[in-house]
Image: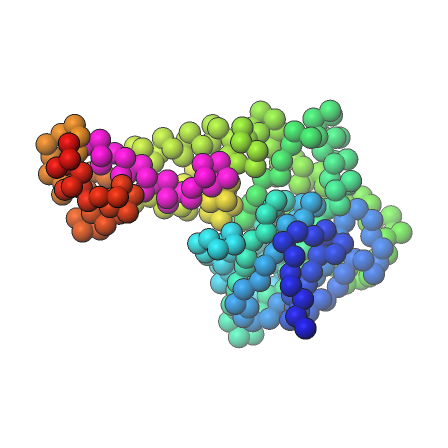
Amino acid sequence: MKTRTPERTTAAAFPRHPSVHVVADSASLRWSGIYVRRHRYPRVVDRFLVPATPEPLITCMMAGSAEWRERDVGGAWTNHKLGRGDLFVTRSKIPYEVRWSSPRGEEIEVISMHLAVDQFLAALEAAYPGRAHEVEVIDFFGRDEALAHLCFACAEMLAQRVPGTSKRVAPFIQLVSACLVEKYTTTSSAKPEVRGGLPIGQLRKVQDHIAEHLAEDISVEFLAGLVELSPFHFSRVFKQTTGVSPLQFVTRERITRAQQFIRETSRSLIEIALEVGYTSPSHFAQVFRRVVGITPTEFRSAL
C-alpha cells in the first residue's frame, strides 16, 4: 500500500519518493550535524509533495537536466529549467508540490543537504550573538558557484564513503553552515513585520512598482526580481503577507484604479480599460464584474 507523504517531517525521517533511487546517504556514514542524500530521479514525475522540515535545506543539481515545476499546494505552477549546478535553498514552513520531466538519457541526479537544527543555530549564534532567534533563511533558486562547489565536494566525500569520524567532516559541515548563514539569512533589520512574509520595505517596493505600471504587463517573474527571490518563493511570501497572490493583487489594484477613473472622469470605458492594463474591453468587463459584482457600465450608471 502506498504511504501518504506527510506535510511536515524531520530531515532524519525525510520521506523519499518511491521511484527515486538513493545513490548515497550520510546516515550510513554517521555524519553528525548534517543529513545528506544523493538521489537519481526518474525521467518523469507528475506530482510529488515536499514536506516542510525544521532543518534548512540546500539542494544542488549534480547531473542531467529537467523542466521543473513547483507550487504551493493547489496554487499556480512556477517553471524552472534545471541543469548541473543549479541550487535551491529553503527552510519552508509549509509543504509544496513539485513535478518534473527530463529528456531521455538526461535524468537528473541531485544532492540534498539538510543542516541539523542544532548545527544551524550554533552557526547563527556565532554570526549574530544573542540574535539567532531573529534570523530567517532566505529562499533562493539560482546559481552560486561557491556553494555548488561545496555540494560537489560533499558528493565526492559520499562517493568515497568518508566516515563521520574523519577530521574532514566536521570542518566541512561548519563551512557549509557559515556559507548558509552569511549568504542566505536575513537579520532583524530586514525581518518581515508579518512573520514568514515579505519585509515591509520590499513589500512597498513591489506595491509602488505595480501602482506605477498598471497599464503595462506585470509578471510574477519581474516582481520577484525586484526583491531578489525566485518567482515560486516570492509568490509564497507575498501571499503570506497580503493574503492574496501577486497576480490577484495586481488585478485588485487595476480594478480599484478603474473604479476611481469611472467615478472621477468622463473618459470612455475603453480608455479606462487601456489605462489599467486591459487591451480587450470584454476581458476588462469580465474581470471587473468578477471583482466588483457588476459590469463597468452598470457601475457608472449607478453613480
Q: Main secondary structure of the magenta part?
A: helix
Q: In the orientation shown, which residue stands out farthest toward the bottom?
A: 104
The residue located at (58%, 62%) in the rendering is: 48
- Residue nearer the viewer, 281 or 171: 281
Which quadrant holds the C terminus?
Answer: top left
Which quadrant holds the N terminus?
Answer: bottom right
- Residue nearer the viewer, 119 or 159: 119
Residue 258 shown in magenta: yes
- Residue nearer the viewer, 37 or 45: 45
**182 lies left or right of 268:** right
- Residue nearer the viewer, 74 or 20: 74
**12 lies left or right of 293:** right
x and y percentages locating residue 138 in the rendered image:
58, 39
x and y percentages locating residue 291 in the rendered image:
29, 43
The residue located at (23%, 39%) in the rendering is: 276
Q: Which residues are the magenta region?
A: 238-261
Residue 211 shown in magenta: no
x and y percentages locating residue 275 in the rendered image:
20, 38
The image's colouring method is rainbow
x and y percentages locating residue 273 in the rendered image:
19, 42
| Picture layout, residue 169 above or below residue 241 | below
How many circles with numbers are drawn on the protein?
0
Q: Is residue 106 visible?
A: no
